[in-house]
Image (cartoon, grey):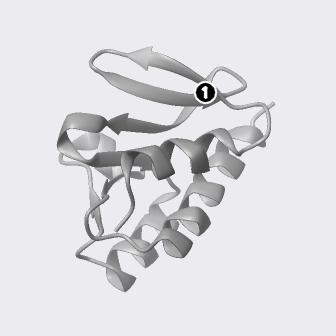
Amino acid sequence: MVSVRTFRQLALACKETVELPHFDKASFRVNKKIFATLAEEKNLGMIILTPEEQYVYCKFAPEAFAPVPGKWGLKGCTHVNLKKVDKAVLKEAMDAAYAGKRSKR
């Protein structure tokens, strides 16, 4: 289990990350690109992975990771159930999401 606070800390620990509002969620961005969002009241995070990375995380920990429904999920947007995810696994996935957006400079 990971708290909302821990999710936020992991996201903000990524170099040059800023937190900005995104509709009713907090978003975490690098180079003006969102790599994660947080819906605090739902204990639900979202990270943007490649479709291949998404497949691996969803297969490895299906109780913690799931594709976002619809077309966003097909593009790698992945829900993270904070009540079910292991902190070390979340950090690894968060780092992958961050790296994918950071490299697009």
Residue drawn at (45%, 44%), measured in percent from left and top? 5
Report the residue marked by disc 1: 33
Q: Is residue 33 left or right of residue 104?
A: left
Name the quadrant of the C terminus.
top right
Dividing the picture into quadrants, the one containing residue 82 is bottom left
Amino acid, disc 1: Lys
Q: Is residue 50 left or right of residue 12?
A: left
Residue 42 location in percent, x, y? 18, 42
Taking depth in this image into account, of 36 and 74 the one nearest to the observer is 36
Residue drawn at (34%, 80%), measured in percent from left and top? 61
Name the quadrant of the N terminus.
bottom left
Relative height, residue 17 to residue 67 (above, below): above
Residue 79 location in percent, x, y? 30, 53
Mark 1 element type: strand
- Residue furthest to the bottom in view is 60
Label 1 packing within 10 angstroms: few (<14), some (14-19), many (20+): some
Q: Is residue 68 left or right of residue 13?
A: left
Residue drawn at (47%, 27%), measured in percent from left and top? 27
Residue 17 location in percent, x, y? 69, 31
Q: How many marks?
A: 1
Relative height, residue 74 to residue 28 (above, below): below
Residue drawn at (78%, 43%), measured in percent from left and top? 103
Relative height, residue 42 to residue 56 (above, below): above
Relative height, residue 26 to residue 63 (above, below): above
Residue 37 location in percent, x, y? 42, 36
